[in-house]
Amino acid sequence: GEDVEQSLFLSVREGDSSVINCTYTDSSSTYLYWYKQEPGAGLQLLTYIFSNMDMKQDQRLTVLLNKKDKHLSLRIADTQTGDSAIYFCAERNAGNNRKLIWGLGTSLAVNP
Amino acid sequence: DTAVSQTPKYLVTQMGNDKSIKCEQNLGHDTMYWYKQDSKKFLKIMFSYNNKELIINETVPNRFSPKSPDKAHLNLHINSLELGDSAVYFCASTPGQDINEQFFGPGTRLTVL
C-alpha cells in the first residue's frame, strides 16, 4: 500500500543547515509536499514539488526529489530558532487526487 | 481576516457526552476536511466534503457524524465520547475537489475525561 516515512526527530544548531528526509512507496506520485506545524497551530504549506522536477528552491528552502529512489528531502539553510516545528511530508498520487498520504512528521529542534 | 476558523479551541468533556466542533472558511473554497491528530502527532483524514457532498469517508466510528450546511461550513458531531477520542481535530479546505494546497484551521483540542 501507499506509505510515507520520515525520521521522527532532528536536532541542529542555530545557523547550521537542516536536512529533513522522506521516503515514499507510490511510484505514481504526482505532487509531493512539505507542511510545517508550529507548536499549538495548524499545518501550513511550506513548499511542494511536481514529480517531474528534481529540485525546487525558495529562499532558504531547497527541495530535492530523487524519483528513482522515491526520496524527498527538505533543506533549510541558516536554520533559525523560529524554524523549530514539526515538518510533514505528504504525497498525492495519480490514483487518488482527493487526499494526501501523510508521513508521521519530523520534529525539528533548533538549539541556540 | 481570510482563514479557516474552528470553535471551540479547547473542549474538555466527560466520557459518554455528545459534543460538536464547528469549522468555517471564508476563502471561497469548495472542499473541506476533518483530520484527527493524535498525541504522537499522527495525522489521519476522517472526512471530506465538496460543495456539501461527502466525498471521503475513512474508517471512522459512526459516532462521528459530519454535517455541511453550506460549502463554507463543515461541522463535526461526536456521540458517546470515549477516552480514545481525545486528540486535536483540524479542519482544512482546498479550492477544488482535486487536492493541492490545503489551508488548515488552528485546531480543536478535545480532552475526554
Image (spheres, coloured by chain):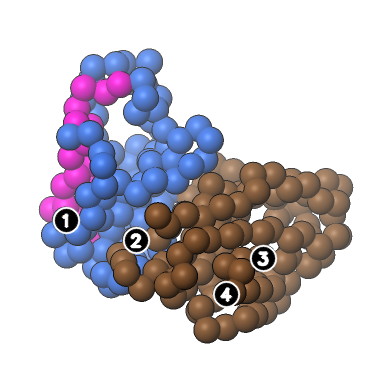
Chain colours: A brown, B blue
Residue A24 shown in magenta:
no
- Classify the position of the N terminus of chain A by image quarter: bottom left
- Chain bearing mark 4: A
User: In the image, what residue occupies the spot 34% across and 28% down?
Assistant: B85
Mark sitting earlier along the chain (2/3): 3
Residue corresponding to mark 2 = A99
Q: Which quadrant holds residue A14?
A: bottom right
Name the residue type under label 4.
Lys
Q: Estimate the spatial distance between the alpha carbons at disc 1 and disc 3, rounded to whole Å.
A: 34 Å
What label sits on residue A74 in the rendered view? 3
Marks 3,4: beta carbons within 8 A: no
In the image, residue B21 sits, relative to residue A92, either above or below, namely above
Distance Cα–Cα, label 4 vs label 1? 33 Å
> Can you identify the residue that label 1 sits on?
B54
- Mark 3 or mark 4, which is nearer to you? 4
Q: Can you tell which quarter of the image residue B78 is in?
A: top left
Q: CA distance from mark 3 to mark 4?
A: 15 Å
Name the secondary structure under disc 3: strand
Reading the image, the residue beneath label 4 is A67
Q: Position of residue A40 (x, y in %)?
A: 54, 42
- Give left or right: position of B106 versus A75: left
Residue range in magenta is: B63-82
Q: Which mark is in front, 4 or 1?
A: 4
